[in-house]
C-alpha cells in the first residue's frame, strides 16, 4: 500500500470509530487527494479545533473557495458541528476527515465526482 492508502485507511478508521459513521470510501479518497501534499505534513494534516484563525482558514479556503458556499454563520456552525462529532477532546482532527464530513454536511459530494 502507498503512504496515501495508509492515510486513507487511518481516516476511514477515524470516521468509523471516532465519528460513528460509515465512510464512503470513493468520496473519502477523492477528498483526501484534494487535500494535496498537506496530508503528508504533520502540522498541515490536522486541524486545531480550538484555534479560531485555523477554523477561519477552513471556512475561507475550503468551504467558500473549494465548495463555493456563501459566507454566513451557517459555515462556522457546520465546522463546530463537525468538531463536536469528531470529539472536542480529540487532539488530532485530520483535515481530510473534517473536509469529508463538511462535504457531506453541505451535500457537495458532486464536486468530487
Image (cartoon, helix red, strand yellow):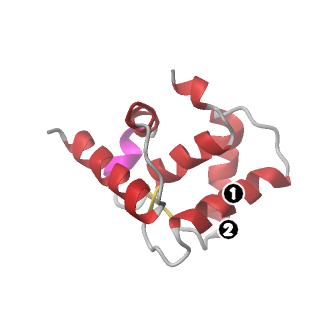
**Is the C-beta separation of discs 2 and 1 under 8 Å?**
yes
Residue occupying the far left of the picture: 1
Label 1 secondary element: helix
- Per the rendering, the mark at residue 1 is none
Neighbours of disc 2 within 10 Å: few (<14), some (14-19), many (20+): few
Q: Is residue 18 visible?
A: yes
Q: Main secondary structure of the magenta part?
A: helix
Residue, disc 2: 52
Seen in the picture, residue 83 relative to 91 is either above or below; the reply is above
Q: How many marks?
A: 2
Q: Is residue 8 left or right of residue 64?
A: left
Q: Residue at x 64, y 32 (%)?
A: 108
Label 2 secondary element: helix
Q: Is residue 93 left or right of residue 9?
A: right
Q: Is residue 102 left or right of residue 72?
A: left
Q: Is residue 86 magenta?
A: no
How many angstroms separate mark 2 from mark 1 (CA)? Answer: 6 Å
Q: Residue 16: give x, y in percent of width and height.
A: 40, 56
Q: Residue 63: give x, y in percent of width and height.
A: 67, 42
Which of the image's four quarters has the N terminus?
top left
Q: Is residue 38 magenta?
A: yes
Seen in the picture, residue 42 relative to 112 is either above or below; the reply is below
Residue occupying the far right of the picture: 72
Q: Residue 97: give x, y in percent of width and height.
A: 46, 51
Q: Residue at x 69, y 40 (%)?
A: 106
Neighbours of disc 1 within 10 Å: few (<14), some (14-19), many (20+): some
Residue, disc 1: 56
Q: Which residues are magenta?
A: 36-41
Q: Residue 102: give x, y in percent of width and height.
A: 61, 46
Amino acid at each position: 500500500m502507498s503512504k496515501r492508502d495508509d492515510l486513507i485507511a487511518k481516516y476511514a478508521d477515524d470516521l468509523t470509530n471516532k465519528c460513528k459513521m460509515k465512510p464512503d470510501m470513493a468520496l473519502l479518497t477523492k477528498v483526501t487527494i484534494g487535500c494535496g501534499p498537506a496530508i503528508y505534513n504533520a502540522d498541515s494534516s490536522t486541524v486545531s479545533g480550538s484555534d479560531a484563525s485555523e477554523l477561519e482558514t477552513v471556512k475561507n479556503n475550503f468551504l467558500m473557495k473549494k465548495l463555493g458556499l456563501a459566507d454566513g454563520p451557517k459555515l462556522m456552525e457546520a465546522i463546530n458541528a463537525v468538531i463536536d462529532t469528531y470529539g472536542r477532546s480529540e487532539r488530532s482532527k485530520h483535515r481530510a476527515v473534517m473536509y469529508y464530513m463538511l462535504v457531506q454536511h453541505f451535500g457537495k459530494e458532486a464536486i468530487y465526482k
